[in-house]
Amino acid sequence: MKKILCAAFLASAAILTSAQADTLPAPVICVVAQTTLDKSAALKSIVSQLEKKRTEIQKELSTDETKLKAEDKELSEKQKKMTEKEFAEKRQAFEKKVREVQSKLEIRRVQMELAFEEAKKKVYEAFLKVADEVKQGAGANIMLYKETVVTADAAFDLSNQVLEKLDKSLPTVQVTFKSEADIKQLIQQQQAQQ
């Protein structure tokens, strides 16, 4: 009896699975290269803006570094003329300035990272929307990254169409840098969580 029930159950499951498979549409697949996003005008505009900001930061920090080196040298030269207490106070003040510059560097690093991530997210969202539109326009119902496919005819590759449409819909992205105060608060929150 158990064998009959089990066989009946398996037969009904097979029929249900077959019926569900019959209702699914036939796959029509196209591919897009992962590098399409990197080649986009919007991402190139982001990189250009970040490079400009990085150059500004390097100039700023270079100036700070030059000042600190000069101050350290001056402090070392004056050490012989100071009491131990005076030197310790001056050294402590100098080390505080060094920590402030290091903190500024960390803030700038986080500013750059967050700005890049937020801007890249906008490009990726536009990429997904455009890729879906191109996929539908081609009559496909599945789009895969080209790099995940072992082999496919070039006709399945819609990378150029996606890139062209992405560049038209989102030619640039304005990179926004959070304020120092916001970054300090974020860093403090992260440190508190650790």
Image: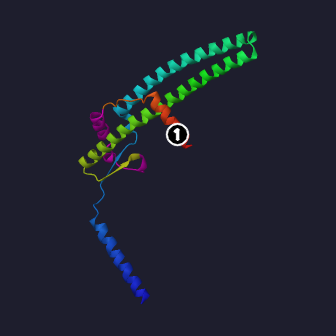
In the depicted structure, whether residue 180 falls above or below residue 120: above
Q: Is residue 70 visible?
A: yes
In the depicted structure, whether residue 32 falls above or below residue 29: above
Residue 65 in the image, given as x and y percentages of width and height = 58, 18
Q: Is residue 36 visible?
A: no
At 27% from the left and 36% from the top, the residue drawn is 169
Q: What's the amino acid at mark 1? A: Gln
Q: Is residue 8 left or right of residue 75?
A: left
Q: Residue furthest bottom?
A: 1
What secondary structure characterizes most of the magenta part? helix
The secondary structure type at the circle numbered 1 is helix
Quick one: quadrant of the C terminus?
Answer: top right
Quick one: quadrant of the N terminus?
Answer: bottom left
Q: Which residue is identified by label 1?
A: 190
Residue 154 in the image, given as x and y percentages of width and height = 34, 45
In the depicted structure, whether residue 67 falls above or below residue 54: above
At 42% from the left and 46% from the top, the residue drawn is 147
At 63% from the left and 14% from the top, the residue drawn is 71
Q: Is residue 95 magenta?
A: no
> What residue range appears in magenta?
147-170
Residue 145 in the image, given as x and y percentages of width and height = 39, 47
Dividing the picture into quadrants, the one containing residue 63 is top right
Residue 83 in the image, given as x and y percentages of width and height = 75, 14
